[in-house]
Amino acid sequence: AGRIKGFIVNKMRGDASLFTDGMTTISRQTGWEKLGLVTHCAHVGDLPAEDASDLVNETPVGDGLRVIVPQLPTIANFDDLDPLRSDPGVTLEIVAPGRPLPVCDLVIIPGSKATMSDLAFFKKQGWDIDLKAHTRRGGRVLGICGGYQMLGKSIEDNEGIEGPPGLVEGLNVLDVQTVLTNDKRLTEVRGLLVPEGVPLTGYEIHVGRTTGPATQRPFATLDGEPEGAISPDGRVWGTYLHGVLSGGNARKALLSRVGCAGPDLQDHDERVEAALDAWADHLEACIDLDALLALARPV
């Protein structure tokens, strides 16, 4: 306690003046300097979720395009979903284990830290049966990174990267095969969405190489080179690109395929930057920054 010099009270809701005496009492009884009372800031709702459970605990609202995401045990890069979470034309629902995948417009299988393990979990829930029923109804599917690998016919791990070497059958909704390798690809990318030709940005962070007939119908082109795969009927899409939904134009083009032809959409990155600026302004208004910086400087 002797190392504590000041305190800040965070997420105060309601009339901040009601806690003025409380701040004084804390300071008097602890000897700590009052540095600020931070009131609730609505703009933080536009910031990326800190943990995947933040998405799972949300209650779906609205009557827009219904997008379903199965909750994988080792879901990775779940901020891919944030642009949909904040899109007014979309109702995003994370489906917890033990529940079937409900009828929806689009199923997204996200990235995974352990693709083969999450694939086994997916099948154990019976979601593979639900997914095939979804595609028979004409529903769309998007697999991102590990989710893309799961959509194929098989995943082969000869080098034991994720566990004992072996080959497992995929979900068989996209005609591709994946071989996991020790080479990890990590790079920012720019390209065009196929067939719309809409510019997109994103990044790759994955191990494995995916090949097969469906790659002849690419999801995107990067510097003129094909990336990802699309099924013959155009309803199942696979890509290694994270962040592909962040760009407003690319997101609009993808959602338009599912029948959600709304107005031009804001780039999600711009929305996040605006939220960060608003949060910084809010903190500056609530906290005595001169006192805080004075405490932080070495004696």
Image: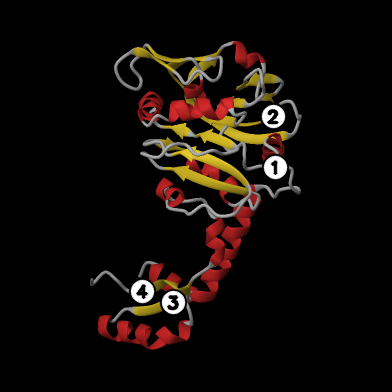
Tag 3: residue type?
A: Gly
Q: Percent from the top left, x then y, of residue 147? A: 49, 28
Image position of 209 with respect to 90: above or below: above
Q: Nearer the viewer, residue 280 or 144?
A: 144
For label 2, the crowd category at 10 Å Cα-Cα, with few meaning under 14, some 14 to 19 and many 20 or more, is some
The disc, 1 or 2, on the residue closer to the chain's N-terminal end is 2
| Residue topped by disc 3 | 36
279 vs 23, left or right, is right
Q: Nearer the viewer, residue 123 or 196?
A: 123
In this view, the mark in front (2 or 3)? 2
Q: Are marks 4 and 3 in contact (CB under 8 Å)?
A: no
How far apart are labels 1 and 3 at the CA level?
A: 45 Å
Residue found at x 43% / y 37%:
100
For label 3, the crowd category at 10 Å Cα-Cα, with few meaning under 14, some 14 to 19 and many 20 or more, is many
Tell me, for residue 260, which label it has, or none: 1
| Residue topped by disc 4 | 7
Secondary structure under tag 2 reads strand
In this view, the mark in front (1 or 3)? 1
